[in-house]
Amino acid sequence: MALGTILSDVSGYLFPTPGRTDRMKQRETRKVGVTHMRLPLALVGDEVLVPCVDGVSRRYVGLDAAASTGVLPSVMDRVLGFLPSYSSVHRGAGYKSQISTTQYEDARDAALRFAGREGRDDVAIICRNTTEAINHLVYRLGLRPSDVVVTTVIEHHANLLPWSRVATCRYVECLSDGTFTLSDVESALDASPKPRLLTLSAASNITGWMPPLGEIIEAAHLRGIPVVVDGAQLAPHRPLPHNADFVAWSGHKMYAPFGAGVLIGPRSAFSDGDPFLAGGGAVDLVDLNEVVWTAPPEREEAGSPNVVGAVALHAAIDALEEIGWPEIIEHDRRLARALRDGLAATPGVRVLGPDLASDTLPVAAFTVEGVPFALVAARLSAEFGIGVRHGCFCAHPYLIRLLGLSADEVAQFQTNVRHGDRRSMPGAVRASCGINSRDEDVQSLLDALTQIASGREAPCAYHQDPVSGDYFPDLANGWLVDTGSRGGSCSPG
């Protein structure tokens, strides 16, 4: 849809004729761009053709939803419709500023609703992403080195590193299949000294496995221990846990990649003490010798907020709620079975994680016998137009356990990395699906892996960059862009 058409379509909602209330205007605006909501639902860019090394352009098969999703058309439409009224938030009396402020606060209300927090004295703090949200919370809880935080070895680094910087972590270990039980968590909670809190992921970003979250939260609460949930992977696939004390998630994993994430928790947790960030908007009064902080959630959001990201997140929440969890879950389970069963049935492919009967998100990590994981990912991209993730997935301790690596092997990898050589880094390949994924996308992956695992010769040579550990097609005229000299590698995480 052309930008001019979109702006024309929504102008009546943003700048209405007299007599129509702002709330009516905004409710109608939210309907713009929401049409066919049965799954799979196409995202912006799904039909993009990408060049492959054989000279053929193929439809891009995006199987990396666990990292970042594409944009829902209704999210794009809502953002484009909002931009003519974009202005400062909480800063101006002008009409556009009032619209922007209302849209921003509506997004906050939608986040609370999405997390099942209506009717509770909780606040939604809008930040950049889950990583920032957890760092924010760690600071505000005022933990000390003697405080014990129980967490698990399956966590994303975002839910490991912030806690270990300020407190003593007690880890729930996993089995060789990457799972743990309620009793494993209870044992960690009952150990002495008593933990200050429990923090864990609602779903693994490597295997898609979901721990028994409801039972775990109940067990912690029975012991008087608050619970923090990293909901980044769960948010686009299942309802967030309404009984967790704190929950964080990101818009970029739920079809709103405009840089907004959310931290939700009790208002009382943010009512006293200095905020994580200091600056304009977080204060009621400033003198050179004294600061009077304002009330939460504004106290926690210093600086000009990302109103566009908030609008996008709100639109994504509306879309997921309109689709409904039953349809999303059914779609996920069908793709998860097709993905995991298909990979397990492909000769030479090893699927990491729980057994095939387990209920997981449509996420699967795997290795191919005799082929480096980074080369598998490079070949899938360059030869077949399939986008996947590879490396350690920002969850190194978990992947080390899934791969069954010894302490000596890990020590050698660490030595190599310290010398700037990532060629032997451990890792795997991950494929992950979203609401736009089709059965034929999974089949395309399985067909491509069958060829790679069978030893079929590549149409060109590949070279490995020692600094990043990644592989690139060795073509005389290059391939796409000079990625080797730009930014970080894919593998480490």
Image: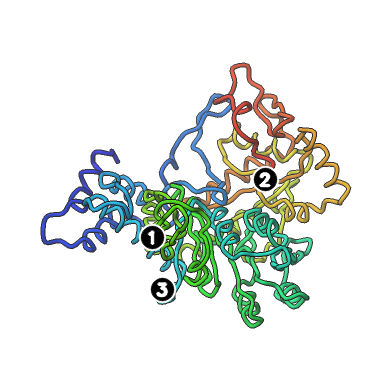
The spot of residue 76 in percent (x, y) is: 36, 47
Q: Nearer the viewer, residue 453 or 471?
A: 471
Amino acid type of the residue tagged 2 in the rendering = Val
Q: Crowding near pointer 1: few (<14 within 10 Å), some, many (20+)?
A: few
Q: Which residue is mark 1?
A: 284
Q: Nearer the viewer, residue 463 or 156?
A: 156
Q: Crowding near pointer 3: few (<14 within 10 Å), some, many (20+)?
A: some
Above or below, 154 against 407 in this view is below
At x 63%, y 46%, the residue is: 446
Amino acid type of the residue tagged 1 in the rendering = Asp
Amino acid type of the residue tagged 3 in the rendering = Glu
Q: Mark 1 falls on what kind of element?
A: strand
Above or below, 182 against 308 in this view is below
Which residue in the rendered view is the most extreme toward the bottom? 222
* Image disc number at residue 118: 3
Q: Is residue 417 left or right of residue 124?
A: right
> Upstream in the sequence, badge 1 or badge 3?
3
